[in-house]
Image (cartoon, coloured by chain):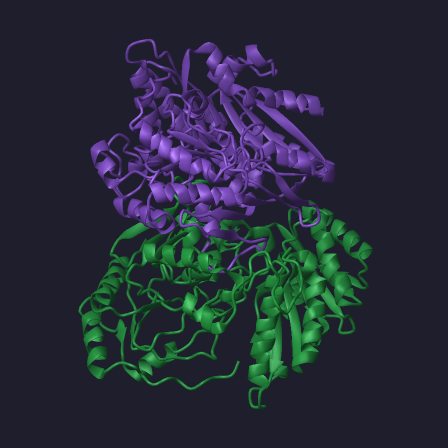
Chain colours: A green, B purple
Amino acid sequence: MTSVPTAAPSYSAERQHAVAQALRAVLPAGCVLAALEDTKPYECDGLSAYRQVPMVVALPQDEAQVLAVLAVCRELAVPIVPRGAGTGLSGGAMPIADGVVLSTAKLNRIVRLDATSRTAVVQPGVRNLAISEAAAPYGLYYAPDPSSQIACTIGGNVAENSGGVHCLKYGLTVHNVLRVRVATIEGDIIELGSEAPDAPGLDLLSVFIGSEGMLGIVTEVTVKLVPKPACARVIMASFGDVVTAGNAVAHVIAAGIIPAGLEMMDQTSVRMVEPFVKAGYDQDAAAILLCEADGTFDEVEDEIARMTAVLQAAGAGAIAVSTSEAERLRFWSGRKNAFPAAGRISPDYYCMDGTIPRKNLAQVLTGIAQMEVKYGLRCANVFHAGDGNLHPLILFDANQPDELQRAEAFGAEILALCVAVGGTITGEHGVGIEKIDSMCVQFQPAELAAFFAVKGAFDPVALLNPDKAIPTLHRCAEFGRMRVTGGVLPHAGLPRF
Amino acid sequence: MTSVPTAAPSYSAERQHAVAQALRAVLPAGCVLAALEDTKPYECDGLSAYRQVPMVVALPQDEAQVLAVLAVCRELAVPIVPRGAGTGLSGGAMPIADGVVLSTAKLNRIVRLDATSRTAVVQPGVRNLAISEAAAPYGLYYAPDPSSQIACTIGGNVAENSGGVHCLKYGLTVHNVLRVRVATIEGDIIELGSEAPDAPGLDLLSVFIGSEGMLGIVTEVTVKLVPKPACARVIMASFGDVVTAGNAVAHVIAAGIIPAGLEMMDQTSVRMVEPFVKAGYDQDAAAILLCEADGTFDEVEDEIARMTAVLQAAGAGAIAVSTSEAERLRFWSGRKNAFPAAGRISPDYYCMDGTIPRKNLAQVLTGIAQMEVKYGLRCANVFHAGDGNLHPLILFDANQPDELQRAEAFGAEILALCVAVGGTITGEHGVGIEKIDSMCVQFQPAELAAFFAVKGAFDPVALLNPDKAIPTLHRCAEFGRMRVTGGVLPHAGLPRF
């Protein structure tokens, strides 16, 4: 999306000085930034349309310093926005004008790696890919692989419950994190979760994962490591229309196969990517599917054969199977570069992230095609199809009158359609500030009240990433949309299941 | 365990009359029980050592009536104990003397079953096995299979996050429930979770599952159904000593195999069961393992071959593989009947439920053997070995002076050892009233405070199953045991990992 001007600071120079001084008293030299040239790089995350320079940035180096930063902020009533690598796409790490950004950048140590129990204990600022690199000598890796994995941090992954192209088989962050250590706003260190399959007491680990920085600051994460599969191959299948492709996805899953990855791209996406990446995609196809199998050599041969048969029976045209690791990576390269490719063919794009039941894939694609006409904008569709997780990329030009507004309305209508067919407004990018109004479509007042009550249980002073992820009822009332339980949304007329 | 006398009621006849009358005003005839002969059957659950007749039992027939019962209890400040089938083993459904038992027995309808999306929507009083029976015509079933599955309800499974012998591969309740509808003590109906892999907002579904009736009353559960495997076979392997058997479990998992079931029984268990069940177990073995493979015919052949090789290399003696479905069920029959068999050879037994890292299996077994000497009591060990979930059965005779006390001390020491090696005090049976003191060993004050804060977010009036599952700090202080973070427990001298 396009950029909007930075808002003027809403605090006095005295206030900024007082907060910075209090933080400097508890952090080492160089770990508190207040000058504009230093704080400016923190003004946005991956949702660059929303920008705000923070009052102060704090970079604690250990757990005790995290607690000290929280104590200062509590004492001075300063809101805190936690930040990993800032690669998030929903504005969860966008600063607050009179707030502190607590960066985990200096908490970047791999504490220990136990190849026998297949776990690693890492600090929150460790990059996702760095965990797999450290585990590689043992034949292990950390499974969730967001597209940003070269840069994004495990702390940010915990905040957003990040997924990736392999999460159909290997799960989201919540399925791959065993335990977190958390510094609370009240000054305690608590450990949530355990190495056991089930832990006694309330499952606060799951509620913490995906809580977008609203409940506490992660100081240590214990992740599960899994054995690197001996072999992986990917099928690239072409389809003459998107409905057939969407149904083919449902057929693969219905056959009892859980592919390591099951991704779909429509013709707009393929034609956007292919000239740039040269992945070998069929530009004449209305849609292509990428279906990966991994495991032992025999398992992969067997699964590739079964998937090929299902895809052919489901109406696939051309089918190609990777015959080398280099070819496998080339097939994936187009999918992984879809977002950058969108930037090449359109001045701006708006990446959506909704989830729907797999059986409704074809129906939602048809709906999006109708919206393209209605809003006069093109939309490239890229999906984690196996999960039913859509990433429609709405292409627009912010310099044309009205196009940003039309893109936003287009996006909101896609999300409302996702909810109407029984899906959700976000698959893996989080709510942040971007989708906070869509939460009013997804949830009832009593459900939002339950979220706030749990938020209040962890953060009674409401200083941790306020005004993100959960809309107030007042905000929903202003937005003018409340979900009708058991009913249907005005625009859709579709059953909820 | 043995029974203790029922405590005298702590309420007046007027109070009981007032509560019963208020409930009768909102429920159909026959749905409110107050006479002792009617309420007596509700005095305990599967933990029969703890008994308490409730003041009143309410049996609502639909969601609106559940809300009405909660409104009456809130109005009159009556504590509520939710109850499914009462098969729980930790006293989670034990009544409160001046409280209401809210039974879900009449909420027993399968609302709908969708074979395409592989989901079923059921009321909480539906029996676990009834879901699989309803799904059987479609080749589907509900995976979690607690030993009590013929009787226990899905609502109780949600409350306790129940597992079963197949949860190593198929997960616990939390992995197989997509959504719950909940009646809150504040009078709202909220829906937690969704059919999507990830839902926006806080993950309150996970926190609700396993919350032992403390957060709300389930009125509807959406479960995942999975395809019935075409084929299943089980290996029965004998071992000359328990340490070798324990290490063999670790080797199977380390080989990258996830068996459909991986269970272990020691010689005491085998000799206890075999004369009764005639499962064909090797009574000369120090321990036996049962390792099941399921899937397509080829997958099962392949996995059985790989498991056999790993078990042989790990020191197994005799190995038998089931050659028919009847034989497979016979091999399992001994394991499934371990608890009743204990009742045949010992006047009383105390079933423990702790979880440890798999690599510590051999070490914990050695520790339990030492405790048998120390406490002068026998212990039969039955495990969900693949999960590291232990079910030691401490055999005793409550009519002998001191034996109950020794059994309880023995049990507490087993749980403390589980925590000391990095495990937990419960695997799948919950905390209830039985393990509430052991929670003081497992958690720090700040962690217990976080549990209470979340409990308070859902139940600010503290009427839902009070005094279960989470001990107050005061209670822990009286119990005299607080976990030392990063340190070691007094009795163990073992590292936490």
Q: Is residue A243 above or below residue A202?
A: below
Whether residue B238 appears in this view of the structure is yes
* Figure quadrant of residue B355: top left
Q: Report whether A2 appears left or right of B186.
A: right
Task: Please name whichever residue, B29 or A334, is drawn nearer the observer in this view of the structure.
Answer: B29
Q: How far across and down, in percent of the image, does residue A495 sit?
A: 66, 58
Res. A37 image quadrant: bottom left
Is B371 drawn above or below residue B444 in the view shown? above
Q: Residue at x 64, y 20 (%)?
A: B330
Quarter holding the N terminus of chain B is: top left
User: Which residue does the image show at 44% across and 31% down from the upper left?
Assistant: B57
Query: Where does the image place residue B202, in percent across and percent down from the top left?
Result: 44, 57
Labels in figure, total: 0
Q: Position of residue A329 (x, y in %)?
A: 64, 64
Check the image and report above or below for B205 versus B362: below
B326 horizontally vs B313: left or right:
right
Residue plotted at (51% across, 26% down): B264
Q: Is residue B291 above or below residue B471?
A: above
Observer-nearest of B34 and B2: B34
Relative depth, front residue between A71 and A12:
A12
Left or right of A208? Residue B307 is right
Q: Is residue B312 visible?
A: no
Q: Residue A461 appears at what percent x and percent y?
A: 28, 62
From the image, which quarter does the C terminus of chain B lie in?
A: top left
Question: Residue placed at 43% from the left, 37% from the top?
Answer: B23
Q: In the rendered image, which quarter is residue B13 located in? A: top left
